[in-house]
Amino acid sequence: MSEALANGLKLHRVSFVAPWLHDSKIAELVYGGKSGVEDLKKKSDIALEKFKSSKKVDYIVAASDTDKTAAMFGPFDYYLNPKRGKVKEWGNQFAVMAWRDWLEYNPILFAPKIKTPILIIHSKDAAIPMGAEKFFSKLKSEKDFQWIENLANSIFMTKNQPLQIQ
């Protein structure tokens, strides 16, 4: 969304709710340092070459609290709870060849070019709040940041009205 907005997508206002916004430093924090990131990129390259020659996609589990090889390992309730994001239509899989693009993509770079008013709603308990803070600090458009405690269980209302950019 940040890239689309920076490239001129016309929307009146946009809200980012618990966005995953990373740069290379944050990727290293999340994925085991420089060596962890490089290892995932190598796996990505191998999987991409396999796909090019065989048209077969190698997958790993996308989210798990038991499988340490998962793309997201840990207590990711949203993705693991059938009452939330773990719906039958979602295969809970991640294409290994996608690692390089994922790790090298930096949505934070687009923030200064965005002209659309932005509201960010995040929680210190949600994934990588420092990415949202970095993104917010680089925005030059009208902006607002709402910190919510226990984001997963919050209703996004204040004074019985939806949160709005002030």
Image: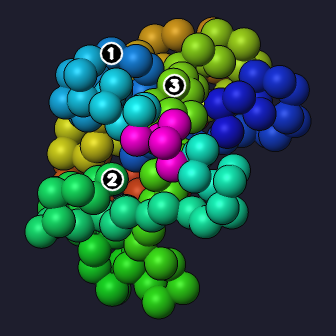
- Considering the numbered disc 1 on the image, is that residue within a helix, a strand or a loop? helix
* Range of residues picked out in magenta: 43-47
Give neighbour class at mark 2: few <14, some 14-19, many 20+ (Cα, 10 Å): many
Label disc, if present, on residue 71 of the rendered structure: 2
Examine the structure image and report whether residue 45 is included in the region drawn in magenta.
yes
- Of residues 159 and 19, the one drawn nearer to the viewer in this rendering: 19
Nearer the N terminus, badge 2 or badge 3? 2
Above or below: residue 61 compared with residue 144: below
Q: Amino acid at mark 3?
A: Glu
Q: Residue 152 in the image: x percent, y percent?
A: 28, 62
Mark nearer the viewer, 1 or 2: 2
Q: Earlier in the sequence, mark 1 or mark 3?
A: 1
Total tally of numbered discs in the picture? 3
Residue occupying image coordinates x 63% and y 55%:
51
Q: Position of residue 7 (x, y in %)?
A: 83, 24
Alpha-carbon distance for marks 1 and 2?
18 Å
Give amino acid for label 2: Ala
